[in-house]
Amino acid sequence: MAPKEAKAAKAKKEEKPVAEGADAAAPETNVKPPRPDEESFKAKLDAVTEQIDKRKEEMKKLTQKIEERSQGKEQYDADRQALYNDMNTVKSERDQLIEQKKEMLQGNRQKQQEAKENKKALDSLQKTVSNLTEEGIDKEIQMIEYKIQTQSMPLKEEKALMMQIKKLKAQRPMAQKNLKEFEAMKAKVETGTDDNKTEKETFEELLNSLEEQIKDKKQKHEDYYTQIKTLKETRDKALEGVKDFIEKKKALKAQIDELFVQRTSIHEEKRSQQKAFNQWEQAERKKKQQRAEEERMKWEAEAQAERARKELEQPNPYLNETTLLEQTIDYCKGMLPKDESAVEEEKKDLASLAPAAGARVLLSKKDRETEMYFTATKKKNLKKKAEKKGVAIKHTAETFAVFEQLKVKAPLTVDDIPSLLESLEKSLAGYMEKVKVWEADRQKKVEAAKANETSAQSTTADE
């Protein structure tokens, strides 16, 4: 069955009447989604695009108005930047002066601290200098010696006073040096006091000068700031109404953004519908392909079964060869010496055999027009003829053709027949082996044909 005929048969089978009591209006499980309406979506997109263009045109007009009111912006920016630069320069100079003032005050505090420390060291040295001179040391030694001589005391205390006298005598060489240091410290403190008066006056003059410069820089800084403020106020006054234009422009921009979102949503809706339709179409195409594949497989199964049936109807391919060999063997055996009863039985057997289609039959001597053997005149001489060696055999063109077809030499004498029979029987045995192989293969094909036929019937039943 061809694929087209199989499809037609399947379509006819699918046209089944609705069973009684069945719901004819039952909903379909695979509903076809609608294809996107191009005209409808185009109209929606055109409407949104028109609104976007309209608002863009309004924004353009507002931008022109803002630019008209904003003339001189470059000059304003340049003037304001120049004032800011000058103000920053003055501020930097003022910061430098303030830092210089801090350094002067720090240096003055350090000098005052040094003077206090020197005065403190002088006072401390002045308290001990009287005891560090030679006169003071001798006076202290005399007092200790007088105490030892006039007072009674333990030996331990007396030894302690003697050690003190020893230490005082050891300090006597350093007394002169200590006196010189005290006089130098005293002179330094007195000189430093005078110098401090002069430095203080100079310091105060420099400090007052720095404060005046800092004050001047501060005033200039404030003047620049006032100029910047005035410049800004003048600019703001010139730009009155521009803020309203800017706010309107921002509002239009927000509306345009919303319209863009709306337009994107329309595109997404269209893509979603198109995607659903494409998926349904692909599913339907897949189903059709699957049905076509099933039909093709069914047709192939039926065709294969048909080919198997036709092949099974073919006859045995070796029938002609085996039949010819068997008849030739019987023919050769018939030329061997036999008794009368065996000859009659053989005639009956040969008469009962029907030749195969297309096979060539060797007739008996009586039925042939031309004799192959020498005809015996009497039955009693048959044994003598057979027993006689080297009896010649006559052949016709047909018998020569048969032996030539079998690819063996035609026997010329009765003595050639035994070896010829051996060769013919060997060939027959080879063909019989081939027949067995063919029959086994034929049996496999029979089973395969039955399986394919069962499969085709099962597929038809499922449909």
Image (cartoon, helix red, strand yellow):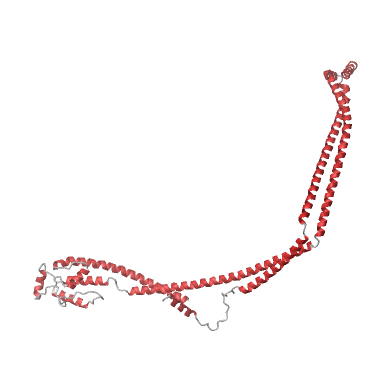
Q: Would residue 109 be found to the left or right of residue 286 on screen?
A: right
**Near-viewer residue (200 or 375):** 200
The part of the image, by quadrant, that contains residue 110 is top right
- Indicate the quadrant containing the N terminus: top left, top right, bottom left or bottom right: bottom left
Residue 415 x/y as whole percent: 14, 66
Residue 232 x/y as whole percent: 81, 55
**Near-viewer residue (9 or 257):** 257
The part of the image, by quadrant, that contains residue 256 is bottom right
Write the residue at 55% across / 72% down. 281
The part of the image, by quadrant, that contains residue 215 is top right
**Is 51 located above or below residue 367 in the figure?**
above
Q: Is residue 136 in view?
A: yes
Q: Is residue 123 in view?
A: no
Write the residue at 88% across / 37% down. 205
Residue 140 x/y as whole percent: 88, 19
**Is 196 located above or below residue 330 in the figure?**
above
**Is 112 located above or below residue 33 in the figure?**
above
Q: Residue furthest bottom?
A: 20
